[in-house]
Image (tube, rainbow, N blue to C red):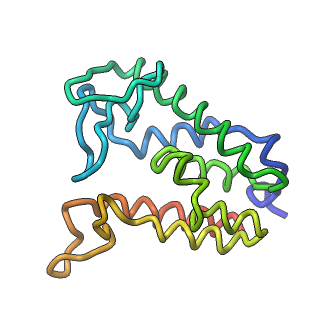
Amino acid sequence: MQANRVRIAVASLALSAAGFIAIVGSESYTSTAVVPTKGDRPTVGFGSTFHENGAPVKLGDTTTPVRALVKAQAHIGKEEAVFRASLDGVSLSQAEYDTYMDWVYQYGSGNWIKPLSPRTWLLKGDYAGACEALLNWRYAAGYDCSTMVNGQPNKRCYGVWTRQLERYTKCMAAQ
């Protein structure tokens, strides 16, 4: 069995350095808070929606690259605790763990614990089904980001869709 397919208890895992780099690499760094897609919350740094103290990011907030990394790590740490607690008795490979933590970083642990998130399938032991469930999360403010416009990717939020496709590919490769 390949190393990326060995599953161990979620409680024993943590986001890898490669997983952290993948997350911040997927997020476009901004020194000043922006709204990344129409209807989204303001983000700053590497897609952080909250500051380390829990205060929400507001338009006009600023950061530096180093502070942005600290902010991202704090955000991930909080989300990771909820993630691990939500998967009692589930085992994942490191590749699966990192992929789902990337999802949680974007959509939040509140969405992770909702029905129809990949968690639902993981709790049933349906690992491929969990990968497929990633593709259901392609909306931003109610808009289907996988939508093409005149045969071209939409400019509104197509990156949301391509990120889900990348997660799906990584997830399926770990099966």
Residue drawn at 80 percent across, 42 percent down = 11
Please give left or right for residue 115 compared with residue 85 in the image. left
* Closest to the observer, 11 or 172: 11
Residue drawn at 66 percent across, 65 percent down = 120
* Closest to the observer, 175 or 73: 73
- The relative height of residue 78 versus residue 121 in the rendered view (above or below) is above
- The relative height of residue 88 versus residue 143 in the rendered view (above or below) is above
Please give left or right for residue 21 compared with residue 26 in the image. right
Q: Position of residue 80 (x, y in %)?
A: 64, 38
Residue drawn at 82 percent across, 40 percent down = 12
* Closest to the observer, 174 or 143: 143
Residue reaching furthest left? 150
Please give left or right for residue 56 compared with residue 84 in the image. left
Quadrant in the picture for residue 119:
bottom right
Location of the C terminus by quadrant is bottom right
Q: Position of residue 39 (x, y in %)?
A: 25, 52
Residue drawn at 27 percent across, 60 percent down = 157
Q: Position of residue 67 (x, y in %)?
A: 41, 18
Location of the N terminus by quadrant is bottom right
What is the number of callouts on the image? 0
Q: Position of residue 72 (x, y in %)?
A: 48, 30
* Closest to the observer, 42 or 154: 42
Quadrant in the picture for residue 174:
bottom right
